[in-house]
Image (cartoon, rainbow, N blue to C red):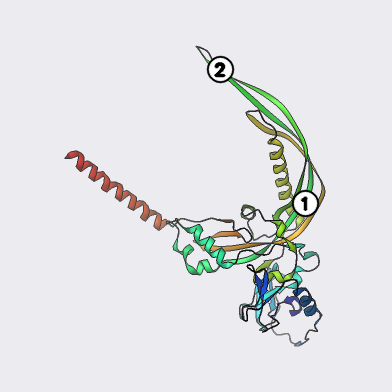
Amino acid sequence: MSEQNILEYKCPACGGTVSFDSHTQMMKCPYCESEFDVEALKKHDADLNAEPKEDMKWDTDAGAEWRESDGDVVVFNCTSCGGEIIGEKTTAATFCPYCGANVIVKGALSGSLKPDLVIPFKLDKQAAKQAYSAHLKGKTLLPKLFKSEATIDSVKGIYVPFWLYDCTADADVRFKATRTTSWSDSRNNYVKTDTYSVRRAGRVGFCGVPEDGSVKMDDAMMESIEPFDYSQAVDFQTAYLAGFFADKYDVTSADCAPRANERIKNSTVELLASTVTGYASCTPEAVNIATSNATVRYALLPVWTLTVKYKGEDHFFAMNGQTGKLIGNLPVSRGKFWAFFTGIAAGVTALGSVIVTLVLK
């Protein structure tokens, strides 16, 4: 990948690489602490694109380039230090491993791949670390690896690609509803069940039904950290990505559509079912939903992630970078479990001895 596809925002004051500060919602230089309005970087972005680029080529056949058969690996150069950065085809923003510069891959965010909107991070890395640490409190059987400072510090902020589905759903649903009556006499108990066919029809509007467009992100976990507040979404600008990782989608909106349709269907049926009252049970038997005014938007949403590999398995944690809602799966240390169990057993045995002694006396 050529350097023309790499973008880094430089501080006009000292030349350092600036990043987006979630507290001030401004671009901030970590070196001289200068702050800049995000909108002001629109012109800066245009100026960078207009600058002439160096064209220094070597005519040599030494070495070889990455090929499609080598996998989804992409190699490009840092414009700050010239270091070689290895990423994936879906990488849209990352860091240089040599100088630490924030790197944005412009080619991954252009044309049909350019997001329509972005929700900026509201919570910084320190907040994510504190939330993760709080999530671990009281879990005495957790392996030490999960509580180590190195593990906690490896949490990273990623702008995850999402498809947002907007539509109007016209629904016609037939429910099977029941009422039960019970009575008894001197000999038997009786239960009578009356069955009814109940029909409900209505129109429901949906705005921003989210489905993540990344193969690497677990769909169930991404749904678990919802909702996001779309009122805080802004038109996409690459400046918001500075200081964070970002991926472009590798699952198309067409491939994600069945999941979105299922969520829209379930929500519509649930809403109509809530209007069926006075019955002991209510079960949908026939569902007919037609959508109109259907549009799809491409968005980048803020997520703090942490992956811990333990005994050959990946344990994944995710936190909503806007609201702080966190989800994760934790293992139990087998050694700690048996030590804990043995301790309980010993305590019970000792208590039993005391009780026996008291009884004998």
Q: For residue 352, which numbered disc appears in the image?
A: none
Nearer to me, 340 or 238? 238
Q: Secondary structure at mark 2?
A: strand
Q: Secondary structure at mark 1?
A: strand
- Amino acid marked by disc 1: Asp
Q: Is residue 188 above or below residue 234?
A: above
Instruction: Residue under label 1, please give it.
Output: 166
Residue at left offset 20%, top offset 41%: 358
The C terminus sits in image quarter: top left
Relative image position of residue 105 (x, y in whole percent): 72, 73
Of the residues under marks 2 and 1, which one precedes in the sequence? 1
Q: Is residue 353 left or right of residue 345?
A: left
Relative image position of residue 204 (x, y in whole percent): 76, 43
Q: Is residue 88 visible?
A: no
Q: Image quarter for residue 318?
A: bottom right
- Amino acid marked by disc 2: Trp
Relative image position of residue 112 (x, y in whole percent): 80, 64
Nearer to me, 178 or 203? 203
What is the CA distance from the residue labelled 2 to the residue labelled 1?
51 Å
Residue at left offset 67%, top offset 30%: 277
Instruction: Residue under label 2, please give it.
Output: 183
Q: Is residue 361 left or right of residue 135?
A: left
Q: Image quarter for residue 190?
A: top right
Q: Residues within 10 Å of mark 1 (few under 14, many from 20)?
A: many
Relative image position of residue 64 (x, y in whole percent): 70, 80
Nearer to me, 276 or 329? 276
Q: Is residue 261 above or below residue 18?
A: above
Q: Image quarter for residue 70?
A: bottom right
The N terminus sits in image quarter: bottom right
Q: Is residue 145 above or below residue 171?
A: below
